[in-house]
Image: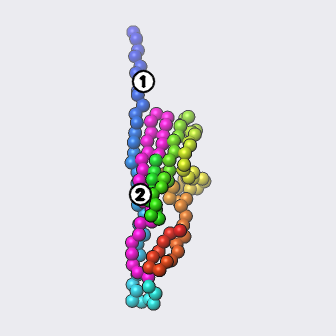
Amino acid sequence: MATVVCAQEPELKVKPSGRILFDAAYINSSHQEDELKSGVGIPDMRVGVGFTYDKWKGKIDMGYAYGKVNMKDVWLQYNFDKQNFVRGGYFIHQYGYQSAVQGDDGGASEQCRVQQRPNDWSYV
């Protein structure tokens, strides 16, 4: 009696991703002496794709911010096992507490301050 074992072919899994950050403010200028106005802004917008294939994983993430399009995350990873991997590319690694609470988009590492321009609030 012979036993036949079929190896399962690895499957390519592709997952699109994206996010849009909105800022909005309502200012009742009848109670103020300055020129601030209400408005809505989109300081950051991202679209990307992640993939897995067998022991390989990767991500390509593009962003639009401050009137420019640029790459945010571009990396390729090889998993040796569930706890060990090697990753190369352009990305921000989350250390310590940030890696425990932060999703895959890296938002907690992007710290900014607000500066006022005439009739405009912008992130720097």
What is the chief secondary structure element of the magenta stretch?
strand
Q: Which secondary structure lies at badge 2?
A: strand
Q: Position of residue 26 (x, y in %)?
A: 39, 78
Q: Which residue is mark 2?
A: 19
Q: Position of residue 73 (x, y in %)?
A: 50, 50
Mark 2: amino acid: Arg
**Earlier-in-chain disc, 1 versus 2:** 1
Residue 49 magenta: yes
Identify the coloring. rainbow
Q: Which residue is depicted at the point 41% across and 57% down? A: 19
Q: Is residue 89 left or right of residue 14?
A: right
Q: Which secondary structure lies at badge 1?
A: loop
Q: Which mark is residue 86?
A: none
Look at the image and give the residue range highlighted in magenta: 36-59
Q: Is residue 46 left or right of residue 115?
A: left
Q: Which residue is depicted at the point 56% across and 52% down? A: 92
Residue extending farthest front:
68
Work out whether residue 103 can be spotted: no
The label nearer to you, 1 versus 2, is 2
Q: Which residue is depicted at the point 39% across and 78% down? A: 38
Mark 1: amino acid: Ala
Within 10 Å of disc 1 (Cα), the crowding (few <14, some 14-19, many 20+) is few
Q: Which residue is mark 1?
A: 7
Picture quadrant where residue 10 is located? top left
